[in-house]
Image (cartoon, rainbow, N blue to C red):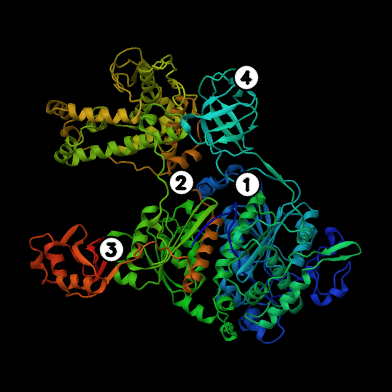
Amino acid sequence: MAWRVGLVAIMAGGALAGSASSSPPLDLSSSKISPSPLPLLQRSPLLLKQASGSLPAGCGIQPLGRLYGGGGGRSASREGITGQGSKKRAERKEKEGQRAIPRMSIRGGKEEATMDEGKSKIDEALYSRQLYVMGHDAMRRMQQCDILLIGLGGLGIEIAKDLALAGVKSLTLHDPTEVTTRDLTSQFYCTEEDLGRNRIEASLEKLSSLNPHVKIDVLEGPINGTVISKYSLVICCENCFGECVKVNDACRHHGVKFMMAQTRGLAGNIFVDLGKDFEVTDTNGENPVQFMVGSITQEEVGVVMTLDEQRHGLEDGDLVTFSDVQGMTELNGIEPVPIKVLGPYTFTIGDTSKYSAYKNGGYVHQVKKTARIDFKSLRESLLDPEFTTSDFAKIERERQLLLIFQAIDSFFIQFGAFPRPGDQQDAEYVLQMANHFNREIIVEGKVLNRQLVDKIDKKLVLTVAKIASGQLSPMTAVIGSIAAQEALKACSGKFMPIKQFFMFDALEALPDKELPMSEYEQTGSRYDAQIAVFGKTLQKRIESLKYFLVGAGAIGCEMLKNWAMMGIHCTDMDVIEKSNLNRQFLFRTSDMQQLKSETAGRRAKEMNPSLNIETYSVKVGSDTEDVFGDDFFESLDGVCNALDNVQARTYMDQRCIYFLKPLLESGTLGTKGNVQVVIPRITESYSSSHDPPEKAIPICTLKNFPNAIEHTIQWARDDFEGVYKQVIEDAVSYISDTERFIENLKQQPTTAPATVKGIIATLGGSRPKSFEDCVAWGRLRFEELFNHQIQQLLVSFPLDMVTTSGQPFWSGAKRPPTPLQFSEEEEWHVEFVVASATLRAKNFGIEVPATLERSDVMKLARKVRRESVGGEVGEAEGNGQVKVPEFEPKQGVKVDLNDGEAKKEGEDQVMEGTSDSDARMLSSLPPLSSCSSVQLEPVEFEKDDELHMDYVTACSNLRATNYNIPAADKHKTRLIAGKIIPAIATTTSMVTGLVCLELYKLIQNKPVEQYREHEWNLWSRFEVQGKDMTLGGFLRHFMEEYKLEVSMVSCGVSMIYSTFSPKAKEKLTRPLLDIVKKDAKVEVGEHQRYLMLEICCNDEEGEEVEAPSVRFALS
């Protein structure tokens, strides 16, 4: 019941969108396409006898618009399938005239005559999460990509939405088709008010508002080779294979990349052709690994061993290079060499026998290798297809589905419409076509068709054919998001593309029994295209669902879009930030700082005015169970999580277990995603399994011996927390409630000295009075952190120190540090002083200059000069300057070499503490009379605050410079310090589509493999009715019903009955609820309908039984 998917190695599914129209013909006469014939799939099975080098009439390139998924019909019944809206269309045309779509270029919803094509600056605030997926180089290449998208039905609008959010340079739309009711099931930017309008015209304003950096164009008229040559990539949506072959030929002639995508009910496909010698700069998107060297042998096949048995994570053929190796220095900066894995900690790198002997130290750096791929044309691929497999359990279906898609297209070409829903006759005709296609035909020595499978799967063909006219929003979400990600690969060269067909079906979501034709009857409803797949009965069930969608972020927005036909509860107490706009497509710039749930609910209602939705803006948790209580959860059909943290997910999982409600759980990590369906009494719950805990960085490593940029970033992050938040909060507590503060201080002997020192520094005589004081303080902190502390460490452990075993102390994971000398010419030096001064000023409510120039800060910093002797750090002189004392070594300083020593030292301090030392420490606190009027404001770290990141980045990089660790830019520092989860809209859309596919199954109670190891599992519980039931009656109930002798009953942490209690017999005649309230002092709220009780019991043999909880009904 769980999907684990990725847009690099893809698992997904598909659906259909489109409608009927006519338009100018597709003119490819100027493209000089090869005159070789199209594959047989473009021919009617009835015309096979005409097989020759030319196309039979009516089976070549069709006018764009006829092949967008609709078309005319063989009979009046076809009108119900192809869509409604003729009356509204006629009224609109009479009112507005036969006007064409105005040709325009739109950026951010406003018309622009010209634009600066040279701009390539990345809006990091907008794309921050996506940049951690794609990277800056790939993003810049995407911003130079012009894409032509043909077809704007449900599938096309999904692709367009994802590409606009991703930030390509321009997106040109071509679709002469008018909106029909069939579009309303999946084309989320079209409503009933748009019936009869052109699909682009109805969608353009909303689509263009998604991203102000993306230019949206509209293309009218015929598409020919000259038009195609202007684009980097052409994507065909909903077009039949015949059109796509011609477009692909033109693309290859002009060196333009090509893609096609189709959805047919619960099946879909994608084809990718990126031309000859396409370069993939990063095949998997994983960050290159880096680790420390433990040893390197000096032999013909040199063996590298990692330090401290750290797993290297490399594979055979990976490329590596080296740095900071001592002894075998020839390896430093060497051209990347391939490795061969010997084990998890060792690998070989080739001949090292002629190199110097290895001494110690060094880093291994993985180097990403590029791949070059040749793609075949669609024409060639139809004869010799290659597949990227979506589901290895269905791998034998790939060729079958390719034949089925061709047969359905041929049916459409002949009859102008897809097979009627559930119609056996139409499905048999598609089967006949599939059999004709599945044979080899050679004419005049030229292969026109090949046999793809040994035997056609008749059941599969009939099943797909009967639902091919349907459209499903979840399916277009999945296929559309994968196609969009493939487009981003084509533009950026990042990630391995599909090679070359991708087939997917979710036929297991269909009803188990074949439905009668009456179930598929079209009613003119906006849901007709979904009825064409599942029937009217299931559609009514979907419309009656009441689901609780928890969260309205990226997943929540996409889920609301897919569920716009259902009654949904939605809650999210977050407000909208700029970084949300890149993934959470229901939000706009004008929505910033508004509540997500309210905004998302409003936008979902715009998509489907008949949507029944209630929005909440309060947090779901134990403190809001009066809002989301028993009545609320009992009324639900299920819960869908759209959350971004484990704590909230776990809470909702517990609530679903308690109320026996199914839970739809999902999540994303960059291009990876997962879906989990939790079904009461059947599957495991979300909390049944846990990810391994993150590996913590040892404190001694952070404090004294960092060896990676992650260590220095965490150290800087902790410094920010301690200096600008914790110390200030301590000072505020001291001022506001001195007595309680001192009492708490006495209870924390290990941290009390540092706390007192921080308060003295904050409230003592050196507290700042002006911004100039803050600059001086920042300059002095630089000296203390990056010079004095490092010198002190080298006093304790000199560079030439050796261990008892004779090894250099500064080796292996211990990198020898170097003190820094402040310089106005060094960027990080000045940045640290500026950020420190500004944060200090904010702490003390001091005004920061509106325009803060580097030169101004340096002018202030120059007043902080170094004195040769004397004076405490920060001591002011009469001339306004502040002395920076020379370093003076401190004697007896204890430096912990590991966390065990640090813990023991803390325990020793507790043992050695005396009342006299406590008194001396407390007496050093500044008197309240001198600081009671001080106004302080703690600063909470926020990863999206540029000032905060300026400080952490500068502080981390200065620390890294101390230890000769390569620095990190602000972008990488933000990722690590803010613990940011990389995200991209395509993954989110795909995952929510998969969730909705599971919902289709869940609604129908599809069988799943049961999760049951014992007689009772986590879903088991005893249900006991009876508000007035006595304790004795409660005990008899278990004996009579389950043959269990209850020996103990508890409610929460309170025991209310036990056989060994002297008052046990006295309680037997009292109501159980009375005992809970009066004896156990358990508060029972007015809204509460149940009590959860725990019991201990024995079976008839006297053996102890592990029994589930008891839900005791109060009414």
Q: Is residue 304 above or below residue 888?
A: below
Mark 3 or 4, closer to the camera? 3
Mark 3 or 2, closer to the camera? 3
Residue at the (72%, 84%) spot, across then down: 74
Between marks 3 and 2, how big is the CA–CA gap?
Answer: 42 Å
Residue at the (55%, 20%) spot, across then down: 358
Badge 2 or badge 4: first in the primary sequence: 4
Asked whether the residues under the numbered discs 2 and 1 touch, taking CB atoms below 8 Å apart as contact, a structural biologist would say no
| SS at badge 4 | loop
Foreground pick, 49 / 777: 49
Mark 4 or 1, closer to the camera? 4
User: Would residue 119 be visible to someone looking at this image?
Assistant: no
Q: Residues within 10 Å of mark 3 (few under 14, many from 20)?
A: some
User: In the drawing, does residue 434 fall left or right of residue 914?
Assistant: right
Asked whether the residues under the numbered discs 2 and 4 touch, taking CB atoms below 8 Å apart as contact, a structural biologist would say no
Between marks 2 and 4, how big is the CA–CA gap?
Answer: 42 Å
In the rendering, which numbered label is found on residue 355? 4
Residue 908 x %, y %: 22, 27
The type of residue carrying mark 1 is: Lys
In the picture of the structure, the residue carrying the numbered disc 2 is: 980
The type of residue carrying mark 3 is: Ala
Q: Residues within 10 Å of mark 4 (few under 14, many from 20)?
A: some
In the picture of the structure, the residue carrying the numbered disc 1 is: 494
Mark 2 or 4, closer to the camera? 4
Residue 195 x %, y %: 60, 77
In which quadrant of the rendered view does residue 642 lie? bottom left
Badge 4 or badge 1: first in the primary sequence: 4
Q: Residue furthest right?
A: 444
